[in-house]
Amino acid sequence: MTRGRLIWPNKVAIARLDLAAMEADADHRFGTPPARVEADPIIIDAQVETSSGLADDRQRLRPSGDDPAVEVRLVLHYQDLEDLGLLDANNVAVFGPSDRLVALYNQDDELLTTYPPATDRKALYCVKARDQGHGLSSTSRNLLILEFAARDAGTNRVS
């Protein structure tokens, strides 16, 4: 049974926040937060929507307070995540809040855009990850939506 596909995929590089490496580096005696450590970027197919296509998000009222404006939204297909082994032991995608968007490539692996590094205040970090759509012909989830916004680097993964 088919699970659909991405319509206009590009390739993106995402650097995951490496919590295990940060924990190993942490000095708990002084209560200081550990330095941010990222794993090597993972390259995966994704549909990319930029802020110009997300105007409806900026116009919504947000009663909950601090809600960063989304600059890039990625749509990833669960079949790709499964094929690349990017699901954890609980079958949950390894991508999530505090992961950083590194680069955008076309399908021929040509670099289209690099995004600011973690040391830059304009770096794009994942602020929201959610499952979307179970398809008309499938009982399996199809899509993972990752939303990225410019914000200060986080050292915690909070969902």
Image: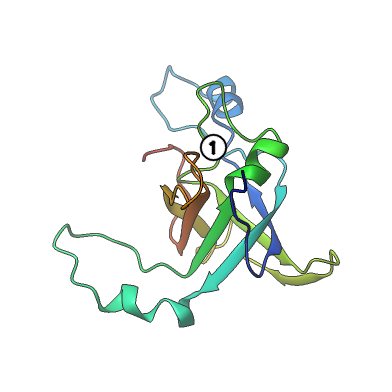
The residue under the point 18% across, 71% down is 61
Spot occupied by residue 138 in the image (x, y as percentages of width and height): 51, 44
- The residue at which mark 1 appears reads as 93
- Tell me, yes or no, if residue 56 can be seen here: yes
Residue at (43% x, 60% y) in the render: 151
Question: Do we see residue 118 in this rendering?
Answer: no
Q: Position of residue 23 (x, y in %)?
A: 53, 23
Residue furthest left as drawn: 63
Question: Where, quadrant-wise, is the C terminus in this rendering?
Answer: top left
Question: Which residue is at a point 48% across and 54% down the rendered structure image?
Answer: 145
Q: Residues within 10 Å of mark 1 (few under 14, many from 20)?
A: some
Which x, y percent locates residue 49? 53, 71
Q: Is residue 62 above or below residue 29?
A: below
**Pick the front one: 123 or 127:** 127
Quarter occupied by the N terminus = top right
Q: Mark 1 is on which residue type?
A: Ala
The correct choice, above or below, for 1 with respect to 20 in the image is below
Please name whichever residue, 90 or 63, is drawn nearer the observer in this view of the structure: 90
Q: Residue 103: x percent and y percent?
A: 69, 62
